[in-house]
């Protein structure tokens, strides 16, 4: 189902397979990322990164490493990403959705030793608290910060009761000021990697995990980022 101006599908697949195996997609991603960072006045080798995972449904084509993510209620695979502070992908790792984030982080970072040689600090969400954070600090010597969601808001009834109790002690408190902000809130640094997942989702091939091999799924992550970065460089 390729466009008519493409060569025969067997030729296209052969080149895709070659570039996937020899790392061409990953090298292109790294070269373009460095160019974009330099255009933005940044060091081409980042010193900080953000990691997160996205559970993606798989199709009926079969293939390796598939499982059930009980937290997200998704059967398929996880796309684990390490991005820089601009949201550009440093490393992608695709694995079974049943692997917890703490263990998935280790798979991601162990496969990204070249890309993270300059990285000193890492932001993670609360799902990595515990052995994931501890391993990154002890094994890789990274400074890790867990970015947590804001506390759940108290009910209006509870806030009024608190204000009434303080009033009994002679302190007048506006109970409405005790209520934390409601609605969506952007979490520091975590929004960067979430935006990257949104960029990937704009590519039709990334709507699900259609691939038989995890390596192919990773190659399409890099291909999607290459497409995005080439467009930015062309506009610049």
Image (cartoon, rainbow, N blue to C red):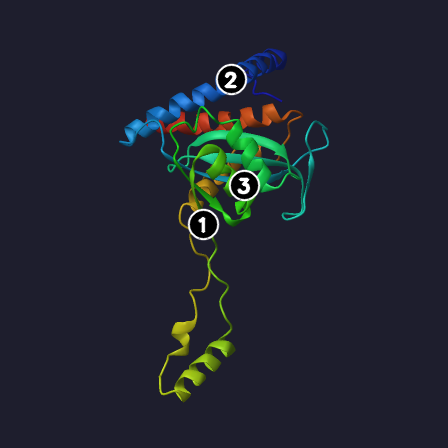
Q: Select label 3 or label 2 by which is in front.
A: 3
**Residue 20, quarter of picture:** top right
| Residue under the image location 46 percent in, 57 percent down | 184
Instruction: Using the image as rendered, state which of residue 156 and residue 46 is in the foreground.
Output: 46
Q: Label for residue 23?
A: 2
Asked if marks 3 and 2 touch (Cβ < 8 Å), the reply is: no
Vertical side of 121 occupied by 221: above or below: above
Give residue 171's position: percent from left, percent from top.
35, 84
Q: Select label 3 or label 1 by which is in front.
A: 3
Check disc 3 and report its element: helix, strand or loop.
helix
Structural distance between the alpha carbons of marks 1 and 2: 33 Å
Give residue 23's position: percent from left, percent from top.
51, 17
Q: Select label 1 or label 2 by which is in front.
A: 1
Give residue 102's position: percent from left, percent from top.
57, 41
Q: Which residue is mark 3?
A: 132
**Residue 8, quarter of picture:** top right
Q: Which tag, 3 or 2, sits closer to the chain's start?
A: 2
């Amino acid at each position: 189902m390729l466009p008519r101006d493409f060569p025969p599908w067997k030729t296209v697949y052969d080149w895709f397979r070659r570039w996937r195996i020899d790392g061409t997609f990953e090298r292109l991603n790294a070269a373009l990322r460095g160019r974009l960072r330099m255009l933005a006045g940044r060091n081409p080798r980042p010193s900080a990164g953000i990691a997160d995972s996205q559970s993606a449904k798989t199709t009926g084509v079969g293939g390796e490493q598939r499982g059930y993510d009980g937290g997200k209620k998704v059967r398929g695979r996880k796309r684990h990403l390490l991005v820089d502070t601009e949201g550009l992908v440093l490393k992608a790792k695709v694995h079974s959705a049943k692997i917890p984030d703490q263990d998935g982080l280790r798979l991601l970072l162990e496969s990204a030793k070249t890309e993270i040689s300059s990285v000193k600090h890492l932001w993670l969400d609360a799902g990595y608290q515990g052995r994931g954070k501890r391993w990154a600090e002890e094994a890789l010597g990274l400074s890790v910060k867990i970015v947590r969601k804001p506390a759940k808001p108290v009910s209006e009834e509870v806030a009024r009761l608190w204000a009434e109790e303080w009033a009994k002690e002679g302190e007048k408190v506006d109970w409405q000021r005790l209520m934390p902000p409601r609605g969506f809130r952007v979490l520091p640094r975590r929004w960067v990697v979430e935006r990257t997942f949104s960029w990937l989702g704009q590519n039709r091939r990334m709507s699900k995990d259609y691939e038989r091999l995890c390596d192919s799924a990773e190659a399409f992550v890099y291909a999607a980022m290459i497409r995005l970065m080439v467009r930015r460089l062309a506009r610049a």
